[in-house]
Image (cartoon, rainbow, N blue to C red):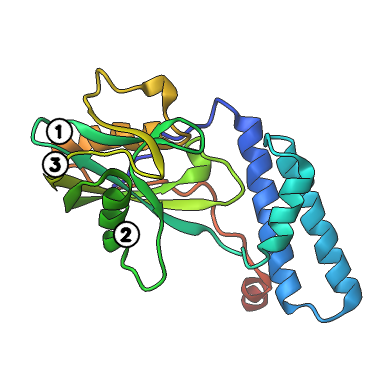
């Protein structure tokens, strides 16, 4: 059974709630804009989208105008996006990390899945593109909901985490990175990690020790499904 002992709940609980509500409101607005054909309905859903941006601005460093522009440029966003990360280990048991160019923080190699690409293929590709190393996958570590591990941001992300072993290649700095290197748990820059990555990295080191007994991670359900009008009809 999966574990949720790494979930970030105490720190930034208010910010987490705001982002969750704003994200849900945004998805509902976009879904409504997709199906609405009445101008008054369209205006209502656009107002909902503006409210979602205003909520997001409360806990996001970006200016409101930038957030609104991003939301209105991406009205296809109606469900979480999928990304892949890879915990690649060398023969010494060290993990491979990159230093991101966008914010200078350290992270696992990873990124968006591409169309017509298997998640496992994306996991291998991202390591190659960001580090110059070739790896072979050795396990699937789990699915991490970015919203519940300190991620936040303008999109709700599901991260598929893979484990891999180093096959060949010396780590190099690429156009996407400022730095790259192998780290043990003791020399890893824990205070300079990208959001949501501490939980994944800790789990990866635990998996490395306990493999194959360690089961894949998943966040445990928080709520029971709400009954809909269909359920109420059948109960009458």
Label 1's element? helix
Query: Is 179 on the left-hand or right-hand side of 12?
Result: left
* Picture layout, residue 188 above or below residue 58: above
* Sequence-first disc among 2 and 3: 2
- Quadrant the C terminus occupies: bottom right
Q: Residue at x 78, y 77 (%)?
A: 36
Give the alpha-carbon distance from disc 2 to disc 1, as whole Å: 25 Å
Query: N-terminal of the two: label 2 or label 1?
Result: 2
Q: Secondary structure at mark 2?
A: helix
Q: Where is residue 185, by image quadrant?
A: top left
Give the residue furthest to the right: 40
Give the Cα separation between the discs numbered 2 and 3. 23 Å
User: What residue sits right under mark 2 in the picture?
Assistant: 122
Q: Is residue 24 above or below residue 59?
A: below
Residue at x-position 41% and y-position 70% = 115
Q: Label 1, on which residue?
A: 209
Q: Is residue 90 above or below residue 43?
A: above
The residue that label 3 is drawn on is 211
The residue carrying pointer 3 sits among few (fewer than 14), some (14 to 19) or many (20 or more) residues within 10 Å by Cα, namely few
Q: Is residue 68 visible?
A: yes
Of badges 2 and 1, the one in the foreground is 2
Q: Residue at x 8, y 35 (%)?
A: 91
Residue lying at the far left of the rendered structure: 91
Q: Are marks 1 and 3 in contact (CB under 8 Å)?
A: yes
Residue 195, horizontal then vertical, whole percent: 48, 34
Farthest residue, direction top: 186
Whether pointer 2 and pointer 3 mark residues with C-beta atoms closer than 8 Å, the reply is: no
Tag in front: 2 or 3: 2
């Amino acid at each position: 059974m999966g574990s949720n002992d790494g979930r970030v709940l105490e720190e930034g609980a208010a910010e987490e709630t705001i982002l969750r509500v704003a994200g849900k409101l945004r998805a509902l607005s976009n879904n409504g804009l997709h199906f609405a054909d009445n101008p008054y309905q369209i205006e209502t859903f656009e107002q909902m989208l503006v409210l979602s941006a205003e909520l997001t601005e409360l806990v996001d460093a970006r200016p409101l105008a930038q957030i609104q522009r991003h939301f209105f440029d991406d009205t296809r966003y109606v469900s979480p996006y999928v990304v892949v990360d890879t915990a690649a280990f060398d023969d010494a048991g060290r993990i491979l990390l990159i230093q991101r160019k966008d914010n200078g923080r350290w992270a696992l190699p990873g990124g968006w899945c591409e169309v017509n690409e298997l998640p496992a293929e994306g996991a291998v590709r991202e390591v190659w593109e960001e580090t110059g190393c070739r790896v072979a996958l050795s396990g699937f570590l789990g699915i991490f909901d970015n919203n519940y591990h300190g991620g936040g941001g303008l999109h709700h992300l599901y991260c598929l985490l893979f484990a891999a072993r180093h096959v060949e290649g010396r780590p190099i700095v690429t156009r996407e990175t400022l730095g790259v290197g192998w780290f043990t748990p003791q020399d890893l820059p824990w205070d300079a990690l990208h959001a949501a990555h501490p939980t994944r990295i800790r789990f990866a080191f635990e998996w490395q020790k306990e493999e194959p007994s360690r089961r894949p991670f998943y966040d445990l359900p928080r709520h029971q499904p709400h009954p809909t009008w269909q359920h109420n009809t059948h109960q009458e």
